[in-house]
Image (tube, grey):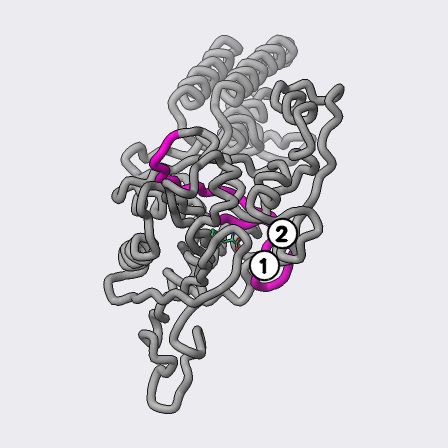
Amino acid sequence: MVEKDSDDHTPAEEPIATPNFIGLLLEVEQDAMAAIEASEKPIDQLRIELLGGKSELARLTKQIRRVPEQDRAQVGTVVNQVKQKIENALSEKTINTPQGATEPIDVTAPGTLPPVGHLHIVTQAVSEITRIFERIGFTRVRHPEVDWDWYAFESLNMPPNHPARDEWETFFIKYPEVSSQNTLEVIQLHTSGKKYKTIVLTPHTSNGQVREMEKGKLPIRMINIAKCYRRQVDVSHTPMFHQFEGLYIDRNVSIMHLKGVFDYFVKQFYGPDREIRLRPFHFQFTEPSFEVDISCGICHGTGYVTKGQKCRLCKEGWLEMAGSGMVHPVVLKNGGVDPAKYSGFAFGWGIERAYMMKSGTKLDDLRLIYSNDVRFSEQF
Ligand code: PHE
């Protein structure tokens, strides 16, 4: 006889003894616990498989009517206990599984490399220049980048209001009040005389000349590399840039030494085929003074790339690189060096410009160097 189910019209099934049904439920529970323990499937998927509408537990629950009616409440409680146990095991697994680690991990796969940086181009140039000069006995030194007007101008034969100062678009700073800045140097200098008046952001590295002489050791072979500041911003100027300043003081130093050192540096830094040329110029702190040009690396000093076609980098075969000259006797005196016994030469170069000439990179905006944009820096 076929008995119809009153609710969902599915055929009635064979009755099942309560202990057997509970036994089946406990089996489902055991299988589920084993699956949770062993499976590497995502937790959400496991939850659907073990507790969802098509799970073994759901299938069994639907058959609860096969147990004698008076036992159904008791069996129902067991069903709920099983459900709860599976639910708890799933939550525990969620807590103990690090996010994203539910996928299998291939421990032999190559890792993701962190991005590797490198030194800024100016730092690279500074180390290279230092190494080149060290080989011929020059020592890298540091002098203040914020300094007394005395060292930046006056001691270099440029008294206040001297028109030659106009060449350096200088940032001036008021000197600190003695009471607010108790460093020994400020007190000593401030009280010792008229010399130290204003403070400047050094517009060139020449402030290192007299400072180096004041160390009182001769001969001097210094290479002072530092930041410089000028009130100029456009495509070929940044308000902060770098210079390297050479100073050589000894007995019988002549222009020949100056030329020899330049020649050596230019061949080391730019290559053996490059030449230098000195052009007469004027600086208050050197006499005689020169501007230093190097032969253009593109047209090799001819000014033309092919017949009739002018070189676009230099236009006339030479690139202006530096200021230089024989140290003026007044400057030697200001540094406590006797000009009757000693002579010397000095030179100052801009590093950003020197580097651009070397790499052949014709930057149409020098400010990019300090834009802090890795897309620029990565190219060097
Ligand atoms: N200080 C000069 C400048 O910035 C360069 C220079 C240095 C000239 C040393 C002569 C001697 O232009």
Q: Is residue 37 above or below residue 254?
A: above
Q: Where on the picture, by quarter, is residue 305?
A: bottom left
Mark 2: amino acid: Arg
- The disc, 2 or 1, on the residue closer to the chain's N-terminal end is 2
Query: Vertical placement of 154 versus 317: above or below?
Result: above
Q: Specify start and end residues of the magenta stretch as a single range.
A: 217-243
Q: Secondary structure at mark 1?
A: loop
Residue 147 picture location, percent across and down: 60, 36
**Front: mark 2 or 1:** 2
Does the image show residue 241?
yes
Question: Few, some or many C-alpha atoms within 10 Å of disc 2 (few <14, some 14-19, many ≥20)?
Answer: some
Whole-percent x, y for residue 271 in the image: 27, 61
Q: Residue furthest bottom?
A: 308
In the picture, measured across the screen, residue 249 lies left or right of residue 323, that is left
| Figure quadrant of the N terminus | top right
Residue holding disc 2: 230
Corner quadrant of residue 309: bottom left
In the picture, the disc for residue 67 is none
* Label of residue 237 in the image: 1
Q: Nearer the viewer, residue 74 or 293?
A: 293
